[in-house]
Image: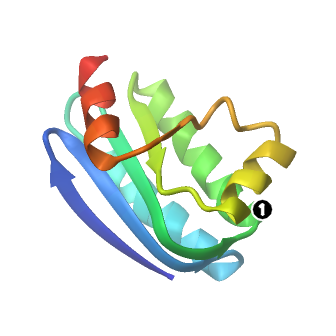
Amino acid sequence: MAVNVRHRENVVILELSGKIFGPAALEFKKTFEQQIASCTGTPKFLVDFAHVTIMGSSGLGALTGAYVSVEQKGGLVAIINVGTNIQNLMIRSKLVETFEPFDSEEEAIEALNAE
């Protein structure tokens, strides 16, 4: 698993690739936590799953934990490019309403900055 971090219009974008489970989920969690800690002001995150081949429950746990941390700081988390595997995992975990996926990076950034 790899995480590419970039910034656009006051939003931290985490581009994930590969498999997110086990040790890779811990790496994702650590990277996300580091980015949360480095935020000044209201944290806004966009997680891009375009290049994720599979995500397990540990990856979903890392995402959910980061979501709670961001929300506690008054911030927001959006997701894009959610494949069938991840969408089904979110449905089974009853988190589909927590993580509403956006159709594009532009749409997600616009929504994050509108809040």
In the depicted structure, whether residue 16 falls above or below residue 82: below
Rendered position, 10 above or below 32: above
Q: Is residue 20 visible?
A: yes
Residue found at x 20% / y 36%: 40
Q: Left or right: 115 with respect to 41? A: right
Residue 109 place in picture, x, y as percent: 27, 37
Query: Residue at the location (31% across, 17% down)?
Result: 115
Identified at 28% across, 65% down, the residue is: 5
With respect to residue 99, does 20 lie above or below?
A: below
> Which residue corresponds to mark 1?
57
Q: In the rendered view, does 43 fall on the left or right side of 25?
A: left
- Classify residue 89 by image quadrant: bottom right
How was the colour assigned to the protein in this rendering?
rainbow
Identify the image quadrant of residue 57.
bottom right
Compared to residue 76, the image places residue 22 above or below, namely below
In the rendered structure, the answer to whether residue 108 lies left or right of residue 40 reads right
Residue most extreme to the right: 92
Q: Position of residue 79 (x, y in %)?
A: 47, 46
Residue pushed farthest front?
A: 103
Q: Does dot 1 land on a helix, a strand or a loop?
A: helix
Residue 42 vs residue 95, the one in the foreground:
95
Circle 1: is it few (<14), some (14-19), or many (20+) Cα within 10 Å? some
At x 46%, y 67%, the residue is 50
Residue 38 in view (yes/no): no
Q: Position of residue 10 (x, y in %)?
A: 16, 39
Residue 28: x %, y % from top left: 51, 67
Residue farthest to the top, as pictured: 115
Quick one: 66 or 18, which is closer to the camera?
18
Q: Amino acid at mark 1?
A: Ser
